[in-house]
Image (cartoon, rainbow, N blue to C red):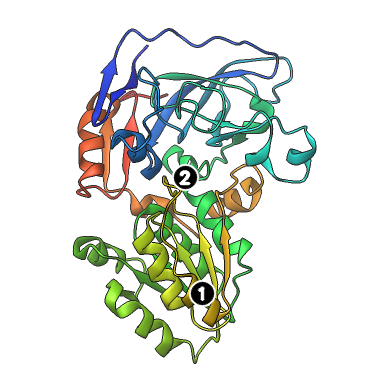
Amino acid sequence: MRGVVYRGPRHVEVVDDLPMPRLESERDAVVRVTCTAICGSDLHPYRGEMPTFATGTVLGHEFAGVVTERGSQVPFAVGDRVVASDLIACGRCARCVRGWHYHCPSATLFGYSTIVGDAVAGGQAEYVRVPFADVVLGPVPAAVTDEQALFAGDVLATAYTAVTDAHVGPEHLVGVVGAGPVGLMAALCATELGAAVVVCEVDPARRERARALVPEVVEPERFAATMARMRGRAEAAVVIEAVGSGAALACAVDAAGPRGTVLVVGAHGADDVAFPAGRAFVQELTLRFAVGDPIRSRDPVTALLRTGRVDPSAVVSHRLPLTEAVRGYELFDTRVADKVVLIPSADPF
């Protein structure tokens, strides 16, 4: 079986001799991957920012496909189209019942070594074993493409978590720091909920691409002033930090305004990020971090896709065969690509 394997910082390899996954539990399924993607979170180990990330890990936590095998407790038939949550959780413990799937004792991520929990091989491969498939997998409606569906497993679900956890509505002004896939999806979700939206992005090329989706896109040095100018239209301000850096967090705090809310969905890989506490105190800000929960948000996110109210395909810049995954990582790492989708087979069905 073919898959993408982590060999060390800035070294991934497409190999052809991975073992075929097998069922290990009655709650397992095996999925033939028809569409997978490189996530911004994959760049942390790729760039060497996670020293404990194990070499030999099969990468990837965003994928959709078709069920080929299933355990007796999995409510899908062989041949069903499905999308996997990036997050693996049991769905039955007290925390899962409360909707806290990321804090499940069994929680882990596909293709992310032991950074979150036990290692599970990822979806940048031709086939993948899905633990707790009765919880982790969701159906793909006929009106939704595989490419659109895979966003429900991470990027779109994370963005949806950001805007709903902040209770965004028509009365809000929403700022988004970062015009990557998560930031743009957050902007589209906030727009769908009726909010006025401003996107801040440091990269000029990304700013230009973002303007095709969001009218108000500015550079960081203009972000706070633009938010202040627009705040008269919507006094309640929410700023979503979708980058995962100290500079982005400081930018979000600076732009939030009095009694604003800063919601961080950018994946911070370091524990020592500087935080402008004095500024946050003076502004009486509310600060929250959210990982995103594709299991809890599956139904409303799927509804957004099925009805066409949000189309995540708009952020895909490169579609490559799985055999070109090394090039895909290089393009994404250097910001030539905004989002890279990988296709394991030229004829997935």
For the residue marked with disc 1, what is the amino acid? Answer: Ala
Residue 190 is situated, as x and y percent measured from the top left of the image, at: 51, 68
Q: Is mark 1 on a helix, strand or loop?
A: helix
Residue depicted at 42% across the width and 76% down the height:
254
Q: Left or right of 336: which side holds 93? A: right
| Residue 178 in view (yes/no) | no
Among the two numbered marks 2 and 1 on one chain, the one whose residue lies closer to the N terminus: 2
Residue 306 is situated, as x and y percent measured from the top left of the image, at: 55, 50
Label 1 Cα neighbours within 10 Å, binned few <14 / some 14-19 / many ≥20: many
Residue 77 is situated, as x and y percent measured from the top left of the image, at: 64, 21
Identify the mark at residue 280; answer none if there is no mark.
1
Quarter of the image for the N terminus: give it: top left
Quarter of the image for the C terminus: give it: top left
| Residue 268 in view (yes/no) | yes
Residue 13 vs residue 33, the one in the foreground: 13
Q: What element carries label 2?
A: helix
Q: Report if the CB atoms under discs 2 and 1 are less than 8 Å apart.
A: no
Residue 275 vs residue 43, the one in the foreground: 275
